[in-house]
Amino acid sequence: MAVRIGTRASKLALTQTQQTADRLSAVGGFAVELVHVKTDGDVLTGPLSQMGGTGVFVTALRDALLTGRCDVAVHSLKDLPTGAAAGLTMAAIPARVDVRDALCAREGKTLKDLPAGAKVGTGSPRRAAQLRAARPDLEVVDIRGNVDTRLARVPGLPGNPETLDGATRVAGKFADLDAVVLAAAGLLRMDRSNVVSEYFDSSVMLPAPGQGALAVECRATDAIGGLGPAGAPRPELTQALAALDDADTRLAVTAERALLARLEAGCSAPVGALAIRKGSMLQLDAVVCAVDGSRTVRSRKATDGLTEIGATLLGIELAEELLAQGAADLADLAGSSR
């Protein structure tokens, strides 16, 4: 019986899910079938930050897992809520790809080359805040849409279509911006890296916790060799998921997500975090920004505790430092009330 893999139906989601499915199939020797699931994030309109918070792209996929419509679900890790989901487990976190944010600008301009008043689009308060901190003279425009729709708002980018079909093109929102900011990982997975005019260094823009990583989620029973949908053991699925898991990536995102959880900030909060394994140490950098970019609080901490517990403690301790430095005064962080 084929392993059914749940995914959103966007081009990026389908691409990264198919890539993950191919790897699972190659390792486990089983057939795979993609199951398309429509989430609230695909249906609702308006700014992401006003669409119900963390999990807007996740809940329907998790429901599909729990009700047996699919056996595995692939998520962009940065979209996952930090709290545990009853009955489910993050069975695999494959090796992370490029964590950086990327500027895609007309005429190949970099951030410093953009003229004062240039319009830069992003749907992320985190990116918007760090853009404003670096270039307060820019006009940051809130945007929605899939990768191609966002890229189509910048004229002259390599590979951009002159026209889009009616389902994608929005009147007045085509070739109207000087640049957009997107995750490098998504562009890489879709083979659209040729549109990037600059990759942001982490000193300018820290990524979202979990950015560049995928999460492969399944029912907790399946992760420990439990029963499949037909009542038969699925050890080949369990083994394939374990083979896809990357220990260093899991450590890094565990630290980042622990920081986010302690701050009690959702994926739309102006919080950036990046953990990197450096030899015998795990280093975590984090920033909390005022939405208008006027102030930022940034800190760094490292640990030699290279376990999930050690990574979790690292994230919590750095979050405490940020709160002690006044991070709660810059953003609406529920964790500051403890």
Image: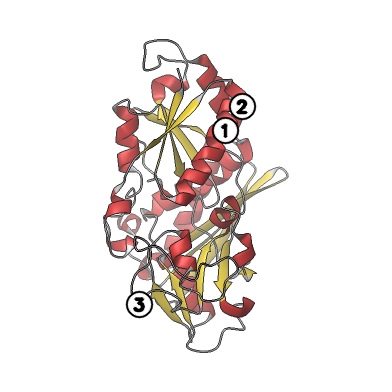
Within 10 Å of disc 2 (Cα), the crowding (few <14, some 14-19, many 20+) is few
Q: Residue at x 56, y 52 (%)?
A: 190
User: Please, is residue 84 above or below residue 87 in the view?
Assistant: below
Which residue in the structure is indicated by mark 1? Answer: 22
Colour setup of the view: secondary structure
Screen quadrant of the N terminus: top left
Callout in the foreground (1, 3): 3
- Real-space CA distance between mark 1 and mark 3, rounded to the nearest whole angstrom: 39 Å
Q: Amino acid at mark 2?
A: Ala
Q: Position of residue 99 (x, y in %)?
A: 59, 55
Q: Amino acid at mark 3?
A: Gly
Q: Amino acid at mark 1?
A: Asp
Q: Give the secondary structure at mark 1.
A: helix
Within 10 Å of disc 3 (Cα), the crowding (few <14, some 14-19, many 20+) is few
- Real-space CA distance between mark 2 and mark 3, rounded to the nearest whole angstrom: 45 Å
Would you say the residues marked 2 and 3 are in contact, meaning their CB atoms lie under 8 Å apart?
Answer: no
The mark found on residue 266 in the picture is: none
Would you say the residues marked 2 and 1 are in contact, meaning their CB atoms lie under 8 Å apart?
Answer: yes
Which residue in the structure is indicated by mark 3? Answer: 172
Q: Position of residue 173 (x, y in %)?
A: 38, 74
Callout in the foreground (2, 3): 3
Which residue in the structure is indicated by mark 2? Answer: 26
